Amino acid sequence: MLAAALIGAVMLLILGANPLTGYAALVDGAFGGTKNLANSALKAMPLLLVGAGITVAFRTGVINIGGEGQIIVGAIFSTLLVLAVPDVPRFLLVPLAFLFGALGGAVWGGMAGALKSYAGVNEILSTIMLNIIAVQILNLLLRGPLMDPGEIERGSRIPHTERLSGNADLPILPGGTRLHLGVVVAVLMAVACYVLLFRTTQGLRLRASGHNPFASLYAGMSVKRNVVLAFMYSGAMCGMAGVTLVFGSEGHRLATDGGATTFTGAAGFNGIVAALFGGLHPLWTIPASFLFGALLVGANAMQRAVQVPAALILALNGLVVVFVVGSMQARARLGRTAARLRAEARESPADTEAPDPDAAAEAPP
Amino acid sequence: MSDFFTVSVLLATLAAGIRLATPFLLAALGETLGQRSGVLNLGVEGVMLLGAYGAYYATLRTESVLLGIVIGLAVGGAMGIVYGVVTLALKAEQGISGIGIFIFGLGLSDLLFQKQVGTPTPIDGLGDLAIPVLGDLPWVGEVLFHQNVLVYVAFLLVPAMWYLINRTPFGMNVRAVGETPEAADSLGVSVNRTRYITIFVGNALAGLAGASLALELGIFQQNLTNGHGFIAVALVYFGAWRPVGVMAGSMVFGLVSAMVLQWKTLGIVVGTTASIVGMFPAVLTILVLVLVSRRTGSPSALTRPFERGH
Amino acid sequence: MAPTTAGDLLLEMEGITKRFPGVVANEAVDFDVRRGEVHTLLGENGAGKSTLMKILYGLYHADEGEVRLSGKPVTINSPSDAIDRGIGMIHQHFMLVPTLTVAENVALGLPPIRRIRQDLGPVRERISELSDAYGLQVDPDAYIWQLAVGERQRVEIMKAIYRDVSLLILDEPTSVLTPAEVDDLFVTLRQMTDGGRGLVFISHKLHEVMALSDRITVLRGGRVTGRTMPSETSREQLAHMMVGREVQLAPTRLESKAAEARLKVKDLNVLGDRGTPAVTDFDLEVRSGEVVGIAGVSGNGQRELAEALAGLRPVVSGEVVMNGVETTDRTPKEIRRLGVSYIPEERMRDGAIGEFSVAENLILTDHDRPPISRRGLLDFKQIEDGCSDLVRRFTVKTPTLDTPTANLSGGNIQKLVIARELSGEPELLIASQPTRGVDIGAAEYIHTVLMDQRAGGTAILLISEDLDEVIGLSDRIAVMFEGRIMGTLDQEEATVQRLGLLMAGVSE
């Protein structure tokens, strides 16, 4: 992280900006005052949902790069629901929207899982392709059947839906900020991922499949089924992120910028970064997501202050992934080797000059 | 649709198909070499984006296409050194660090473009280079021998890469290192040196692939490659780690892209149908991956970092 | 033996010390090799013999000490350095590239004859010459994957002879060979020492050590605990030096009455990983209170047989009846529920999950049943109580129940697997290579546990490549060769010689 910050400073210098001014603006924009803090939390919310979901996939031994697509399909599912039944009361419609979003994400993620389990398709490649397909489906819907009738009337044809039913608006939390229910949902779901992984039978099976598929088969588990399930859980989390991005947005509608990341703000990728930075632990992903959400908010402030595009943060995030992964691996390996050697040395009983009480106790009667 | 089935349009589509196959082919050949030595690089997409931006920017500023090509290669090679250090020295997980390289390339190319160029400014890309005599052949000449220089380079690299892998001492080391690195190491073949070279060359080719895309289109924009690099990785599986197979796969994708483009120009697909057609390459990739999933013969040591004494 | 003179010494390692974080792997070890001799390095796993040889071969760097070759001090930083100085090593696992030919494998790492175009003509010729000189039949153009295990071993020797090594390290070179192939190998090795080469032989098979060695150095806990010669010692003494106490080489077998059949296999056919037949027309019966041993050289269908019985590999045809239930199309879980336990051959691949804690591995097969799992949630109180009990009963040595399993020694991981497999009081136990790679103490313990199970009425199918183990534990021994049973011997009539012939495919 420190290294990435330093590289970022160098990049700012090269781009002709004062790194101190830039970082000052970034920190102030992210953490300065209640409003900025709330904005950081809002930005962190989809990252947390995506990231916590991704820890489930990672721990099952599969890499889910399909967050983008799963967010989009989740958003589409929930939007279709709200368009179909706009008059359902709010206390029902909001949970239903989350449910449908989760369902959409699970379907899209489950496809990658099924392709992996039953057709042997590398999940990284399939999820990337499913992302591209989801973007095209979104464009198709927003330029076609889902386009705001008002846009067609005016002839401006901006690709977005009408303002969706107010009954589906995520309730604003008390306290005078823009924080809404989505933030609470995100934290609760991250905790749910933790419980799933480490407290349930299902979670034990998922982690077993991830670490050692052979031993899992031997113990009577279905690794293929576990992979599909992990992708569905992970996808459902992304789908809920999609719900928060539509029904928690200022426009309260499904939209696209026409580019590759549509309305997601690359949350599908940034969530991976947060999950890795959180050590692939759902609970640590909570602060990690907040940090990266803050970075994204701060980057916008920095862009205004020193005219360096916020894409800088995406580039730095890439570096964080590369180096966090690198150092994690190196540490884990060193630890394992040393521990095993110690165990074997303990095993091989030493001479009397170097007594080892454990080794003595070890000898069977 | 009948507009499409005329000789001149079909020939133009074929020629365009070969041209559009070039970025796939260059990137996939580079990836093939890396994978044969046991290194999976999922960062091709990011390297392509950086190579594309480098080539575009150099050409925009100097109006020299040649310099653009050189910069594309150099940017790719530089990323190769980075990826080499990360996967060989730090022994990072290759799948995830590749994604990191992708995100880095996506962000950095966008950042530099916004900061240095801002508004999309077209450049004069690669012109066609007609080959004497062959270029005059009817039909064949038009399709094969009125292409830009990178097209010729890419297709000549196919036999060259085959020769390198299968007929040279270095190629034997590459195959050994990709299959059983312990055996190579025990005989004094440096596993990591071999892999540094393949990663460097592979990434340079990915950079060149990006350059060929930018110079072909004469433009740069955010996420210009839109999946080209990932498809190139899939093509290595499709081609069963052989240059000729990779070439065949690249042609399929080039032709599909050319067809889609041609349909759009002819107005056969418009509006929402354009979105459907836009899914073709991605859907095709998934289908291809399903088809080749039973494929055996992947290098045994693929994605496995080498560590002595284990 | 001729008296030592300094000129005779090919290799001297003096005061070698190597430390890893928290452990001393070699402590002031002295070791030397003379021209024309086989010097054996004997010791248990973790005793430091591999570390010492890895230092010699440039894979590790010693913290202290000196290495001299022909009297001159040298530093060896990599395998290339070792090769340049005439040191060769034959590793425990073949160091061959399966997708390359024999000639390519031999040429690998040598300076190329032509820089650009690969030219292997001279390599092929030289291989043929050496083949004749040493009686090592190998086809230079065959791909390694086409070769049988014995042939692969010949390619390894060929690589060393081709490089004209003066000192050759052999790390457990006989583990995959039949007794006859071992004899052939020893003839070749003697030919090599007659030519003035020095050999370091690493083995834990005491009878081989006695047969081949000129001198023996025993390591324990990183230090030299004995130096001797075959003429001055015995297998029992060697074992004592290795372990540091009296060891019982053969387990005690009490009389036991075999009762009803727990496993019946009839006309079983199973395919291997490449889709070729691995187990052919196989018949077998194991009764309660009886141990049936399956002997054979590795790769003759034993692994596939065990996997098919455990439900991990599809059965092509035939019948398997366990406890009266036909199981050929049952899942691994259903088979386990019939009271069948399985100790797999590769414990770190199939038997345990390295990253999981000791407790998690102990509940791996019962994780979804009460009392461990209630309404989908894990009951941690139950897990802790049950696992503490198992760890105590089976003397699994671990700092805590939460310790990652990969941090335990091989012997303790095997005890963990056995603890789990025996915790459910199985009626049928399939045990594959239960003591491979574990130290003698753990092996002794495991043998005792298996004998206790037999006495308690468990039917045991013991698959092992260790002939001493098979003969020592089994009531009946079936020998597998190319997927078939070559013959079945009762315990009283089984000898290494008779089993060896059957293992080589010679029926009586």
Image: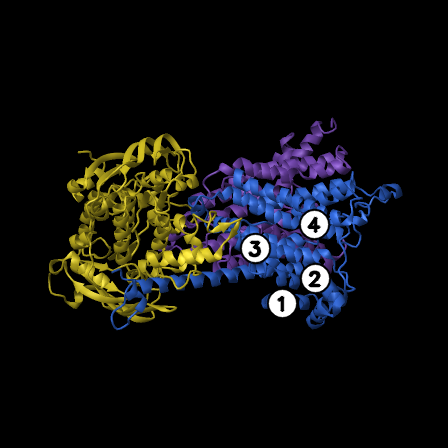
Q: SS of the residue at dot 3?
A: helix
The residue labelled by disc 2 is: A41
Query: From the image, which quarter does the N terminus of chain C lie in?
Result: bottom left
The amino acid beneath tag 4 is Gly
The residue labelled by disc 4 is: A242
Q: Between disc 4 and disc 2, whose residue precedes?
A: 2
Q: Nearer the viewer, mark 1 or mark 4?
A: 4
The residue labelled by disc 3 is: A195
Give the drawing colour for chain B.
Answer: purple
Q: Which mark is residue A5?
A: 1
Give the drawing colour for chain A.
Answer: blue
Verify CB contact (< 8 Å) between mark 1 and mark 2.
no
On the same chain, marks 4 and 2? The answer is yes
- The chain that appears yellow in the image is C
On the same chain, marks 1 and 4? The answer is yes
The amino acid beneath tag 3 is Val
Marks 1 and 4 sit apart, C-alpha to C-alpha, by: 30 Å
Marks 2 and 3 sit apart, C-alpha to C-alpha, by: 23 Å
Q: Position of residue A311 (x, y in %)?
A: 69, 59
Q: Nearer the viewer, residue A50 or C361?
A: C361
Q: Chain of mark 3?
A: A
Identify the residue at horizontal 75%, vertical 68% (top origin). Answer: A34
Q: Position of residue B109 (x, y in %)?
A: 67, 56
Q: Position of residue C70 (x, y in %)?
A: 23, 65
Q: SS of the residue at dot 4?
A: helix
Instruction: Please tell me how crowded label 2 is: few (under 14), some (14-19), or many (20+) other residues with Cα within 10 Å.
Output: many
Q: SS of the residue at dot 1?
A: helix
